Image: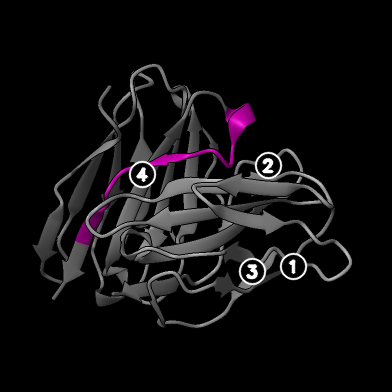
Amino acid sequence: GAGVSQTPSNKVTEKGKYVELRCDPISGHTALYWYRQSLGQGPEFLIYFQGTGAADDSGLPNDRFFAVRPEGSVSTLKIQRTERGDSAVYLCASSPTSGTAGELFFGEGSRLTVL
Amino acid sequence: GDSVTQMEGPVTLSEEAFLTINCTYTATGYPSLFWYVQYPGEGLQLLLKATKADDKGSNKGFEATYRKETTSFHLEKGSVQVSDSAVYFCALRTGGGNKLTFGTGTQLKVEL
């Protein structure tokens, strides 16, 4: 079946603009995760959804970042008033249940560049 | 807090050479340990895992043993192939949490 799909694959924006990044998880996966990977670094946890609710958003760096998953499937990561430091690859992952955390299925990521 | 330290890359090897990528960790409690791999143009994928001390994870000829006494989870392969060229990430998860803590990744390049 299809893997985790992320759009756009690349996004270039100007400082101060608003950005939305979309993640379509593997069908039937109830758990969805967002990570951020800066150049030369490993992925860093942002937020985790179990179903429609954000079960853990402790990794969101500040209140400019917000994510939703209204129907328990597709998720959108929203970044307001973008800053140059937000430039990174944003990774989405899903898993069948939260109990299998660690066995995550990742998308290819959305590369965000803030000019 | 939890952290993972990996040997820096890039690592360049000839085909059929022996591979070791070092990984050590700091964690509260008893973590589960993972190796993820990212092939060019693809997303991260789980390579192998170990959930308790002395467990050995293995897959595709790669192995790693969970060493609690040295807090290590080194990745090894006896004979690498060009197709193993990728970035390898060591990661841990503590307790029943859902967050993975990743190392910075090690790029491996295998040449003919």
Describe the element under mark 3 as helix, strand or loop: strand
Name which residue lies at 20% across and 62% down. Answer: A112
Q: Which residue corresponds to the image point at 32% horizontal and 57% vertical from the top-left?
A: B39
Residue numbers of the magenta segment: A98-111
Q: What separation in Å lies between label 2 and label 3 (alpha carbons)?
A: 16 Å
Between residues B30 and A36, which one lies in front from this camera angle?
A: B30
Image quadrant where one finds the C terminus of chain B: bottom left
User: Few, some or many C-alpha atoms within 10 Å of disc 2 (few <14, some 14-19, many ≥20)?
Assistant: few
- Specify the amino acid type for callout 4: Cys
Q: Residue at x 34, y 51 (%)?
A: A91
- Going from N to C along the chain, the mark reached first, 1 or 3, is 3
Are both tags, 4 and 2, on one chain?
no
Chain letter of mark 3 equals B
- Identify the mark nearer the N-term, 2 or 3: 3
User: Label 4 crowding class (10 Å Cα cut-off): few <14, some 14-19, many 20+?
Assistant: many
Marker disc for residue B72: 1
